[in-house]
Image: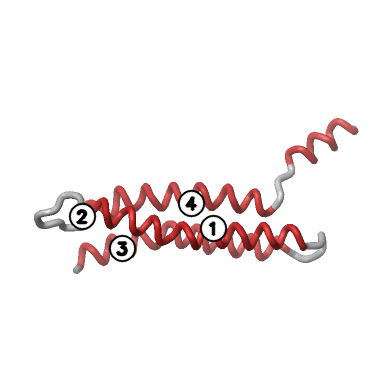
Amino acid sequence: MAKAQEAHLRAYKSYSKRMSDHVAIALVVYTLMLIFLVTPTIESSGMSIFPYFVLVLLVAAVIPLCRNLERRWQAQCATAHPDDGLDTQYFADRLKLWVAAIAIPAVLAVLFTVF
């Protein structure tokens, strides 16, 4: 029984570590969606490097926002008590992160196609 409890404690990840994992995977998904959805829709007359420059700018614009989300969860986990109800905040932030990671490239692809 003690080994099972010890294994459970080792397997437990704090909210900040779980959010950090979600941020990393969401950034990969965001970047891949930009590469395969947005970059082909960007018309470049003359400069073939322009779509890739835009790609780098779009990824660079999102990284500070993701880092702030990670820092906020690190601070919350450092000062939180077990009864603070972080479950709902964690779920809401995780939902916002994934909606943004999927919706931003989709909206940009539509905008670059239309305009």
Type of the residue with mark 3: Leu
Disc 1 to disc 3, C-alpha distance? 22 Å
* Pointer 4 or 1: first along the chain: 4
Disc 2 to disc 4, C-alpha distance? 24 Å
The residue positioned 81% from the left and 62% from the top of the image is: 81
The residue positioned 28% from the left and 60% from the top of the image is: 109
**Quarter holding residue 108:** bottom left
What secondary structure is marked by label 3? helix
Identify the residue under disc 2: 50
Type of the residue with mark 4: Ala
Quadrant location, the C terminus: bottom left
Up-down relation of residue 86 to residue 24 (above or below) = below
Please state the horizontal and vertical placement of residue 35, each as a whole percent of the image. 31, 49
Neighbourhood count class around disc 4 (C-alpha, 10 Å): few under 14, some 14–19, many 20 upward: many
* Pointer 3 or 2: first along the chain: 2
Type of the residue with mark 1: Arg
Q: Are marks 2 and 1 in contact (CB under 8 Å)?
A: no
Q: Which of 3 and 79 is in front in this view?
A: 79
Please state the horizontal and vertical placement of residue 99, each as a whole percent of the image. 47, 61
Disc 3 to disc 4, C-alpha distance? 17 Å
Identify the residue under disc 1: 67
* Pointer 2 or 1: first along the chain: 2
Q: Which of 61 and 4 is in front in this view?
A: 61
Identify the residue under disc 4: 26
Residue furthest out toward the left? 46
Identify the residue under disc 3: 108
Q: Which of marks 3 and 2 is in front?
A: 2
Up-down relation of residue 108 to residue 37 (above or below) = below
Residue furthest out toward the right? 2
